Structures are given as C-alpha cells and as structure tokens.
Amino acid sequence: MPGLAVTELTLSHFRSHKSLRLSFDERPIAIHGPNGAGKTNLIEAVSLLSPGRGLRRASAEDMTRRPEALGWKVSAVLQSLNQTHELQTWSENGSTRQVRIDGKTATQTALGRIARVLWLIPSMDRLWIEGAEGRRRFLDRMTLSFEPNHADATLTYEKAMRERNRLLKDQIQDPAWYSALEIQMAKAGSVIHTNRQNTLILLSAAQHEAETSFPTADLSLSHPVGSSDAPEEEDSLLLALQGSRMRDMAAGRTLIGPHRTDMGAVYRAKNVEARDCSTGEQKALLVSLILANARALADEFGAPPILLLDEVAAHLDKDRRAALYNEIITLGAQAWMTGTEPELFEAIGDHATYLKILPEAS
C-alpha cells in the first residue's frame, strides 16, 4: 500500500521552537524528553498539515513564539500516494493562517485531499463525561478525515445559524429575513448529518472486521431530550426551522439542527455506556476508535493516516502499549508518539525512529 508520511519538517518561530529542521522516513516516530521541552508543540505543527485549528484548537496568534511574536511558519515535505508535495502554512502577526501546496496558494480543505491526520491527546480523556460539544467535535474530526468537504458544509451551516440567531435575539419576526438563512441551514445540515452517519458506518465496519486487543464501541447519534422531532432530511429540516421560529425566539437561539447532535458510545462486550466505564476503559475505547478510523481510512483513502498520539503510552499499561504499537506497525502508519522516557516505547523497538527533544536555551 502506498504510504503517507512527513519526511521533512521545518518550524520557524512556532511555539517554543525558534528554528527546527527534521528529516524522517515512513516509520513511527517516538519523541521523548522532559515535560516542557516542546514535544506536544512539535506534533501540533504536524496537525496543521490538515484542515482546522490543529490539535489544541489554538488561534494563529497563540501559536507564535514569545516574546518575538513575529508570526510563525511550518513547512513540510509530504509523501502521499506515491507523490511528493511541498506544504507550507503560516501566520503573520496573528493573521488567519495561510496555506501553500507545491508553491501555489491553497485552501485548508485542499490539505485534507492529500493528507489525512488523526490525533489523540490527553484532553480527550474526558470525552465521554464532558458535554456534547466535545463529542460532536470529535465526531466531526473523524468525519472530516473521510470527507474533506465536510468542513465547508459545517462552516456554511454555522455562518447561517449565527445570522439567524442574531435575528432571533433582536426579536425580528418578518419571515423574509429568515427564509434564505434557513434554506442554507437545511441544505448544509442535511449534508452534515449524512456525512456523520456514513462515518459511523465506516467505523463500525472497521471495528467488526479487525482482530484487536482494544474494545469495540457501538456508536450512535442522538439529540437532546425533547428534540425527538429533530429532522435530518433537507426538506423536513427546513420545515422544522420555519416552524420553530417562535420557540427559538423565546430562547434567543436555534434549538434544532445538527449543531445539537450528540454521539453516544457503548462498550459492546459489557453493554455499558462509555460514560459509565472506568477511566482505563474510556481511554481504551478512544484508542480503539482512532485505530478504527485509521483502518477505515487506509481502505477509503488508499493509505493509512498520519497518527499523532500525545502521551498515549503513559496512560496505557504495558500490554496495551505493546498492542497499540503492534497495530500501528501492522497498519503501516507513520505515528508521532510523545512520552517523557524512551522506555515507554521499548515494545516498538527498532520499528520506530527515536527523537529526543530538550528545552531550547533562552
């Protein structure tokens, strides 16, 4: 299977890294070093080779190195499906980040057509017990990995919804003001729902067809209590938005639509909701979903995605670490893994490249 890997990475004034240039092959990368050395900053830079705000969801201004605050730049050479691409993304003085692919200005969505990047970071450990927004964002990241245009549908929907919410808060009652916005929301909302449903189908198949040491999760989409009438087809969503104007006006916001969808998960072997599982089981379910996402992408995209696994080894026991490394090797993915000690990666042996990161001298 053709590979997907970053073979060269150059950082300029990005986070803690003033200047850094690295070269790699397609093997997994075990990044180790003390806390505060910039390990997470390094894989955050790689996450920016995909659409969106990266694994920390930070603003462009927050990514610049202090105290210079000159702006930042990430450059990379990407091997993708037997082709080589030169990628640059940057921000000057906190401005919206720009993208260039093979020397030509491009959109962030275009990044998603040539690269697939998945990540798992410690803040996701609370996914199953936090609010629905986090799970929705997690689902949309997985959906985006299969369908890069999902980002366009989401942006269209959210922009129209913000405008509609402004009308609601201003107590505007003239239907003419709402009509065009609701048409946009219904069309984009239907696409969003379809993309999400297709993603759950792909993830389910990838979990069922694989022999893995990680638990299987049964996934579903749900809506808030009292929203059983939440429609999913374009025509029915449009009618529901039109019929909900007075109720929405009283609330000052839109109460129906895909922006209120939640993702449920059940630990299949125990028939227990993920939120009721132990901390270790919740982490294992997360790892299972990332691996399922990666396996499904290997089939859909034609190459396994780049995986960014921040401090994942420290939160798994020895047997689970070995199982994770074995799945990464079998998948053939370039996984960027961070940890404080090289011993955490002992089970992967010489299947990985080792990179020691130390704090830069001030």
Image (cartoon, rainbow, N blue to C red):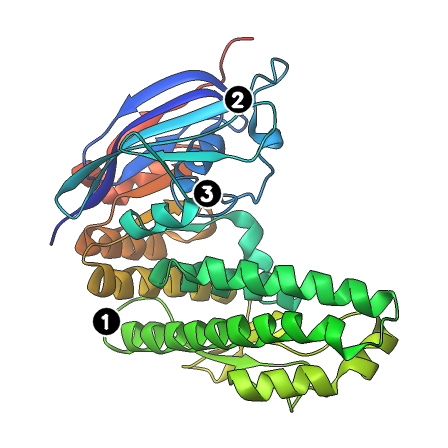
Label drawn at residue 211: 1
User: What's under tag 2, amino acid-wise?
Assistant: Ser
Label drawn at residue 16: 2
Look at the image and tell me in which quarter the C terminus lies.
top right
Circle nearer the viewer, 2 or 3: 2
Q: Could you tell whether 25 is left or right of 30 in the image?
A: left
Q: Quick one: label 3, few (<14), some, or many (20+) residues within 10 Å?
A: many
Q: Earlier in the sequence, mark 2 or mark 1?
A: 2
At x 38%, y 76%, the residue is: 198
Residue 164 on image: x %, y %: 73, 67
Residue 80 on image: x %, y %: 20, 44
Q: Earlier in the sequence, mark 2 or mark 3?
A: 2
In the image, 360 versus 115, the foreground residue is 115
Circle nearer the viewer, 2 or 1: 2
User: What's under tag 3, amino acid-wise?
Assistant: Glu
Please say if the residues under marks 1 and 3 sit with CB atoms less than 8 Å apart.
Answer: no
Q: Quadrant of residue 236?
A: bottom right
Residue 273 on image: x %, y %: 55, 79
Q: Quick one: label 1, few (<14), some, or many (20+) residues within 10 Å?
A: few
Is label 2 in a helix, a strand or a loop?
A: loop
Is label 1 in a helix, a strand or a loop?
A: loop
Q: Quick one: label 2, few (<14), some, or many (20+) residues within 10 Å?
A: many
Label drawn at residue 347: none
Q: Could you tell whether 322 is left or right of 231 in the image?
A: left
Label drawn at residue 311: 3
